[in-house]
Image: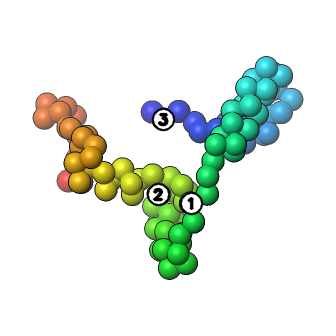
């Protein structure tokens, strides 16, 4: 189970604005402001942007999530991060 990101929480709050408490809304808005303040745009060459957009669409992910996925995969493959170990006695979903 993953925790919802800030954008999802804000969208949910917008959908039920009458039901959300003022304190919860303040927390979400402060969190969003902090993320915006600390966000830096990562620009790529046009051909890379095109490929990135196509891949993000194919994977059903956002551009930023796709970049995070690519970087994590690269770092694991090049041993900068440990590979997620699978427990041999654990359950599997039946796919190879």
Q: Residue at x 79, y 39 (%)?
A: 14
Q: Residue at x 78, y 39 (%)?
A: 15
Q: Residues within 10 Å of mark 1 (few under 14, many from 20)?
A: few
- Left or right: residue 61 versus residue 10 is left
Q: Residue 17: image x %, image y %?
A: 83, 33
Q: Which residue position is annotated with label 2?
A: 67
- Badge 1 marks a residue whose secondary structure is loop
Q: Residue at x 64, y 43 (%)?
A: 38
**Viewer-side residue, 37 vs 53:** 37
Going from N to C along the chain, the mark reached first, 1 or 2, is: 1
- Badge 3 marks a residue whose secondary structure is loop
Residue 54 visible? The answer is no
Q: Residue 72: image x %, image y %?
A: 36, 50
The residues bearing labels 3 and 1 have C-alpha atoms spaced at a distance of: 25 Å
**Viewer-side residue, 72 vs 37:** 37
Going from N to C along the chain, the mark reached first, 3 or 1, is: 3
Circle 1/circle 2 CB separation < 8 Å = yes
Q: Which residue position is annotated with label 1?
A: 42
Circle 3/circle 1 CB separation < 8 Å = no
Q: Quadrant of residue 85?
A: top left
């Amino acid at each position: 189970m993953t925790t919802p990101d800030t954008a999802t929480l804000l969208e949910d709050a917008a959908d039920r604005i009458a039901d959300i408490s003022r304190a919860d809304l303040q927390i979400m808005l402060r969190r969003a402001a902090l993320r915006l303040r600390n966000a830096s745009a990562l620009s790529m060459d046009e051909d890379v942007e095109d490929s990135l957009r196509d891949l993000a669409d194919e994977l059903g992910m956002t551009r930023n999530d796709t970049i995070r996925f690519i970087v994590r995969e690269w770092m694991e493959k090049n041993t900068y991060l440990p590979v997620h170990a699978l427990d041999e006695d654990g359950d599997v979903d039946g796919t190879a």
